[in-house]
Amino acid sequence: MELSFASDTLNVTAPLQDGETLISKKQTFVLGFFSPGDSQYRFLGMWYKNIPQTIVWVANRNNPVKDRKGVLTFRNDGNIAILDVTKNVIWSSNVSRLLKKPVARLLDSGNFVLMSNDSTVPDNYLWQSFDYPSDTLLADMNLVWSLNASQERYLTSWKSLNDPSTGDFTLKLDSFHDSVTLVTYHGSEKSFRFGPFNGRTLGGYPTQGLTFKIIVKFDKNETYYTYQPYSSTQLVLLTLNQSGAVNRLIWTGTEWFVLYASELNVPCQNYSYCGSNNICRPSKAPNCECLGAFEPQSTKNLGTPSHVCKRRYPLDCERAKGDKFQTFLNMEPPDMLIVRIKKDINLTECEAMCLTNCSCSAFSTLDTGTGCSMWFGDIIDFKEMRSTYQGQDIHIRVPPLRSGLGADMEVPLFDFATISAATENFSEANVLGVGGFGMVYKVTVHI
């Protein structure tokens, strides 16, 4: 039987026993001990009062209490701690500063905070659960990228439905020169990416029916990502499950509705599915196609994730001044590994600026209507968006023909599917010979 405090506050005179709970002031969140799934271990966690099956935070996720004799209390130094039946410390807030007259309070935001009872400064928290996320990002809770890695805040998956200990996946904020992406990592390897932030939303997000706004803030050494529902009564979550899938959930009153989710093991969805300098098209088969300045390194595995694209011609900065741009509509922008953001120029100026640097590979306007993004070096994780998602128009740099034609001559561009059909899928029967850049094929073109 679950008992309950009539309070949202833990104080030094009344520890929280297993079976008792704290409830936030407006009856939104509950803090207490629980056992996930069929586990017999006990964890201190937080859940919605009216949706008790949704656990949003776990304190001692990597060190459970083995029985129902655990207690949440204050130590002599003012830290909150979970003790087992033998008084061993299972978990602690671990604040180094000595606290006088400490209290811990469960807020209606879902933040569990430690503070001094006689503090006159609002939000003067000495410790808060929002700084130690589990697998769920609540509204107004921040993911943080920092130059100091120890200050970063990110989500970590549960190991399984029965085990909230640290799993194999993390959801982190990546930030580079005012650009922001959300990236799922499997260990140290990128596995999925949302972004970049275009001033309103993140690339890869659907744009219809959004009930919340995304907020990104920058300072000198850190970048912050959070969100806020448009309605104070709307419950919205961002979660990372044990399989590495990111889910944006909205409560309908009876169940969690999945607004969108990262689709694992689907063509073009896994990070850099086609490798570098490719475009990935889930609507076509094969999915992978070399970009204009590149061509397949060999005829083996054409159009598959294992094919490799090489540069058609050596990079020549003098010739590159005559390059053109091929526009791809409604695309998910490439990963911003090396990028430059210019907020005070128009698209024509952006194109001209990109052409002055032979390493500039692509550019795009910002969603705010002014300014642009420019990509440098290899193009990574570039893919076509589905029709229900709003992408961006990306302008990819392509070289002029090197056959003596003037740099200002318009040259027709053919996509991979057209070329494949014209050569009967690169049939050996159509091979005319070998040129300086690879096989030469006879083509059949229907006009």
Image (tube, rainbow, N blue to C red):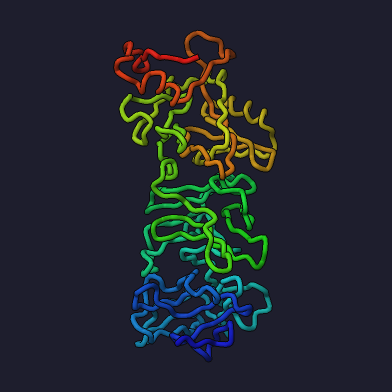
Residue 53, image x and y in percent? 47, 72
Quadrant that contains the N terminus: bottom left
Height in image: 148 above or below 417? Answer: below
Front-lying residue, 179 or 444: 444
Tell me where residue 347 sits by quadrant: top right
Q: Position of residue 129 (x, y in %)?
A: 52, 70
Residue plotted at (52% across, 79% down): 98
Give 444 or 156, whichever is nearer the viewer: 444
Q: Residue 257, relative to residue 439: is it above or below?
A: below
Q: How many marks?
A: 0
Q: Horizontal placement of 295 versus 126: left or right?
A: left
Q: Residue furthest bottom?
A: 13
Q: Is residue 317 left or right of residue 121?
A: left
For image coordinates 51% across by 50% down, the residue present is: 174
Is residue 141 shown to the viewer in this render?
A: no
Q: Position of residue 104 (x, y in %)?
A: 55, 80
Q: Quadrant of residue 234?
A: bottom right
User: Which residue shows up at 56% across the image and 71% down it?
Assistant: 110
User: Closer to the camera, 2 or 276?
Assistant: 2
Please state the horizontal and vertical placement of residue 297, each as a whole percent of the image: 35, 25
